[in-house]
Amino acid sequence: MKLPILIHPDPRLKKVCDPVPDLSDDLRTLAKDMLETMYDAPGIGLAAPQVGVLSRLIVVDCIKDEESTPRPLIMFNPEILASSDDLSVYEEGCLSIPDQFADVTRPEAVKVAWIDENGNSKEEEFDGLWATCVQHEIDHLNGKLFIDYLKPLKRQMITRKMVKLKREMARA
């Protein structure tokens, strides 16, 4: 089931999410619905607060090539264990901030631990786009948006555009 995606500014996007204490069928269903929502958007990552659920859950799949096999990852309680000293700059966007993009500098590689949908502990190193995406989504769990990395003027400009967009959507 596709879920509605919250648009910035929304106070739920600025909240720190609670850890998932125990996996339930409802949470597994939420994760699958989030994947469907992400693919439909289309996007490469989605965090639970973006669909109004303040739990530490993200889904990602950075395989964009139609010829390649998708690699959907469901991550409960994801945590960055280590970050590289090397940095990379990616032009980031966000499903909660449609049609707005900006360069963000982040560590080029990260080591992440999480619980998968079967309750198994996982650990993996990500680099490139995968590292950027995982960091971006984990930021959502901590109430941080990619525009928070921007200079105040640029951030305010994007926020004003989103307020206008939300007004237009409400009228439609």
Image (tube, grey):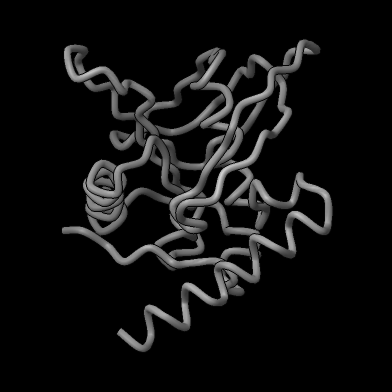
**Residue at left offset 58%, top offset 39%:** 136
Placement of 128 over or under 17, stated as above or below: above
Image quadrant where residue 35 sits? top left
**In this rendering, would 35 be left or right of 143?**
left
Tell me residue 147's x, y (percent).
68, 51
76 or 46, nearer to the observer: 46
Tell me residue 165's x, y (percent).
47, 72
Image quadrant where residue 76 sits? top left
**Residue at left offset 29%, top offset 49%:** 41
Tell me residue 168's x, y (percent).
42, 80
Placement of 94 over or under 51, stated as above or below: above
**Residue at left offset 47%, top offset 77%:** 166
Image quadrant where residue 112 sits? top right
Location of the C terminus by quadrant is bottom left
**Residue at left offset 38%, top offset 85%:** 170
Location of the N terminus by quadrant is bottom left
Q: How many marks?
A: 0
Placement of 164 over or under 101, stated as above or below: below
Q: Residue furthest bottom?
A: 171
**In this rendering, would 6 be left or right of 66?**
right
**In this rendering, would 115 be left or right of 14?**
left
112 or 11, nearer to the observer: 11
**In this rendering, would 115 be left or right of 15?**
left
